[in-house]
Amino acid sequence: MDQSKESILQKLVEMSVSIGETAKDLVILGDGNTSAYISNESFYVKASGSQLNNIGADGFTEVFFKPVLDILKRESISDAELKSEFANARVDPAGKHPSIETVFHAIALSDCDAKFVAHTHPISINSIMCSMDARKALSGHLFSESALYLGPEPIIIDYADPGLPIARSLIYEIKKYQQKWGQQPRVFYLMNHGMVALGQSAKEAENITAMAVKSARILLGTYQMGGPRFISEEDVKRIVTRPDEEFRRKLANK
Ligand SMILES: [Zn+2]
């Protein structure tokens, strides 16, 4: 394996084990999955059946982008076809099968320019994502750090099958976001499911996850004290465009 691929895989393993730590409460059992960009041709993604807390390099599989993204152009696809298309997308045909949620990863790493992606099912996030008022609760920022690390607003996707339906909504929402904000999204929230953190580095994907969880815990607390009081949209815009804040964010994500 060439050196740069080896170092990407090593960072991915370290990030995954850290995210899988039981005390962090982000995933249990085989929940969640992670990925990393290798080149415009391929990426690493968690293999089906691996567990994040004890994953090693052999828990990942290298997948070509093109066959995965080509699936998204199809009108419809059955679960069995999806599974076999993912299997055919493996760079090493004898390699492990990629996670069925590979689709989020391919989109995040290609359409949003992310380099490391962490998809988790944190309890605090899902306490919100499984609620009637989830969209309203996520419609603002409670404190400046969340705007700085998570971006001006999240992308929220209604519950859908992890295959084509969720991919279509994601692609649509990503385009809308990019046009509105002129930047890449850093977090997707999936209703009744979990979150996806999009990092330029492994550290950033972890930081985004940690900040989203912190914000979710505070948000849940606000509902015991009269509900959330968001900072103003002007303040959010100011925070996300200030060069000194951007410098601070980049330093923390290194
Ligand atoms: Zn999931």
Image (cartoon, helix red, strand yellow):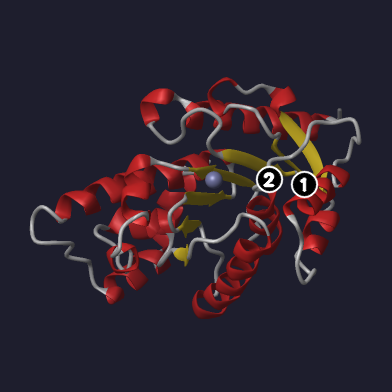
Q: Quarter of the image containing the N terminus?
A: top right
One can see residue 39 in this view:
no
Q: Quadrant of ligand 1?
A: top right
- Numbered disc 2: secondary structure: loop
Q: Position of residue 162 (x, y in %)?
A: 61, 54
Q: Which mark is residue 83?
A: 1
Distance from label 1 to label 2 (Cα)? 7 Å
- Tally of numbered discs: 2
Q: Residue at image x 81%, y 44%?
A: 63
Estimate the x, y position of residue 104 in percent, counting from the top left.
63, 54
Q: Dividing the picture into quarters, in which one does residue 88 lie? A: top right
- Asked whether disc 1 touches disc 2, contact meaning CB atoms under 8 Å apart, the reply is yes
Please say if 100 is above or below 165: above
Which of the marked residues, 1 or 2, is nearer the chain's N terminus?
A: 1
Residue at (77%, 35%) from the top-left corner?
A: 61
Find residue 11 and report its image quarter. top right
Instruction: Determine the residue located farthest toward the left in the rendered image.
Output: 225
Q: Secondary structure at mark 1?
A: helix
Indicate which disc residue 100 carries: 2
| Number of other residues with Cα within 10 Å of mark 1, as a class: few under 14, some 14 to 19, many 20 or more | some
